[in-house]
Image: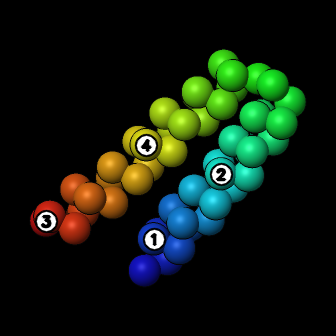
Amino acid sequence: MESKQTKREMIEQLQLEMIIAKENNDPELYHILELIKQRLTSGDEEEEEN
């Protein structure tokens, strides 16, 4: 339970960082953050299947 909460908080923080990167016109950072977010959220799907 605690790890899901931590992961959710990490995703929320990533989303904030992505907004900041977009506002600062930094497409490279935005793309990196987007990849990290995809990796984190894809882990949730794998856990649900098991």
Q: Which quadrant holds the N terminus?
A: bottom left
Where residue 12 sits: x, y (%)?
64, 60
Tell me the element at label 1. Answer: helix
- Model colouring: rainbow
Q: To which residue does mark 3 refer?
A: 50
Where residue 36 sits: x, y (%)?
51, 38
Foreground: 10 or 32? 32
Nearer the N terminus, badge 4 or badge 1? 1
Q: Residue at x 33, y 60 (%)?
A: 44
Q: Return the mark for residue 15.
A: 2
Q: Amino acid at mark 1?
A: Lys
Nearer the N terminus, badge 4 or badge 2? 2
Tell me the element at label 4. Answer: helix
**Are there few (<14), some (14-19), or many (20+) residues within 10 Å of tag 4?**
few
Disc 1 to disc 3, C-alpha distance: 15 Å
Q: Amino acid at mark 4?
A: Gln
Nearer the N terminus, badge 2 or badge 1? 1
Position of 17 with respect to 11 (left or right) is: right
Nearer the N terminus, badge 1 or badge 3? 1
